[in-house]
Amino acid sequence: MREMIKMVVVLTILSFFSGGVLAYIRNNTQERIENQVLEFVKGPAIRAIFEGAGNNPIADRFTFKDGDIERTFFVGVFDGEPRGVAFETAGKGYGGDVGLMVGIDVKNNKLMGVGVTTHAETPGMGAKAKSDPSFTAQFMGLALEQPIAVTMDGGSISAISGATITSRAVSSAATDADKIYQKLKTQIADKLKEFKK
Amino acid sequence: MAKSLTQEFVKGLWDEVPPFRLVLGLCPVLAVTKSVENGIGMGVATTFVLVGSNVLVSVLRKLIPAKVRIACFIVIIATFVTVVELVMQAFAYPLFLKLGIFIPLIVVNCIVLGRAEAFAFKNGVFRSLLDGLGMGIGFTLSLMALAAVRELLGTGMLTFWVTPIQIFGPSFQPFSFMVEAPGAFMALGLMLCLMNLVGEK
């Protein structure tokens, strides 16, 4: 009986300390980890979209509650004017969700560019959506407020050969982004003013 | 019995070097040795966990009831591994992306649990520290050696930190299978064979 109690007590105390130490370290690294994730996972896509921006789009960001989802918006400042806003949406790909960073040119009301952030598509096929810039380049300058689709669905995007599902995922993610932008347009415009330099 | 303190440290470097002599913890050895950089990262992470868990297990060895010792070891090891994981994410994110799942898997690495059970639970704190350090450094060096062979033959380059260094000229045709899974088994087998040949008297 005494041994039983000792086992319970020792394990409890050990787990208690372990939990405390981990909570402390997590609290102290959380912010840094979030920044690192932004920099290395989303950073390359954001920087590609806002090429030539005069600010650091990863540092200049704000968040909104869109229904239940919290969305992060990255701001691109060109010639002192906050003209671009980028945020992430997702489409259903062949191997799960395809994360897409979508940049919107607020001034000219068109797509500034898109970039794939996270995916689990087949290497050499669907994965080209991320590695081959000529596919995502097709989205540059497309008009908003109309569905974006691949050619076989009546749109203007030529799909990656052998990866129609991935191409559709990217197109639908871009269309979703457009819808979200139209919904939050006024709020985004208000926020963007703060970044004027 | 009664080895000197130096012997406790040195044994991990050659006589009982984990992957080659004890043939323990082969999962990360085979999986992450695609580049020297990954090998170093994995080795340092494992060394930290080994030293930490060895010391703590040794300190608590009189308090831990024998019947739940494995559970206690796992709690201690898992704590150190999670610390490594968080710190690596915060300060070396690209390395974390490459090592991925193999960092949390240190929890079930036989070397760490093996040293806690076979050594730290029966020996003093300082001896356990030296044992953990020796084993950890031995493990790191083994990973580096294996990774160097595989990377050099597989790509013609060596990556010590972030940027690869070109070793062979552009005319070198890489044996690309060396950086794939079969290359890991072959390189490990050949190194085991080599170590046995050298160690034979």
Image (spheres, coloured by chain):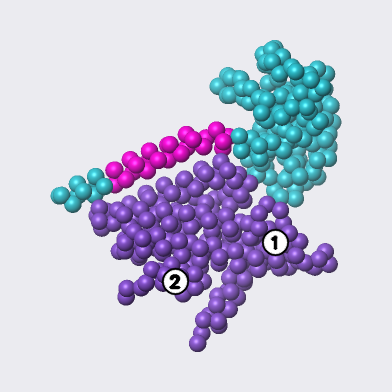
Chain colours: A cyan, B purple
Q: Is residue B201 left or right of residue B98?
A: left
Taking the spot 46% from the left edge, 65% from the top edge, the residue there is: B134
Residue B4 in the image: state x and y as whole percent.
Answer: 37, 72
Distance from Cα at disc 1 to Cα at disc 2 = 28 Å
Q: Is residue B125 magenta?
A: no
Q: Which segment is the magenta one?
A: A11-34
Q: Chain of mark 2?
A: B
Q: Is residue B131 left or right of residue A51?
A: left
Q: In the rendered image, which quarter is residue B198 located in?
A: bottom right
Which of the labelled discs sits on residue B11, or is there none?
2
Q: Amino acid at mark 1?
A: Leu
Judged from the image, the secondary structure of the residue bearing numbered disc 2 is loop
Provide the major secondary structure of the magenta segment.
helix
Taking the spot 43% from the left edge, 57% from the top edge, the residue there is: B51
Q: Is residue A15 magenta?
A: yes
Q: In the rendered image, which quarter is residue A12 located in?
A: top left
Residue B58 in the image: state x and y as whole percent.
Answer: 33, 57
The tag earlier along the polypeptide, 1 or 2, is 2
Q: Nearer the viewer, residue B147 or A144?
A: B147
Q: Chain of mark 1?
A: B
- Residue denoted by label 1: B158
Q: Residue furthest left?
A: A1
Judged from the image, the secondary structure of the residue bearing numbered disc 1 is strand
Residue A16 in the image: state x and y as whole percent.
Answer: 33, 40
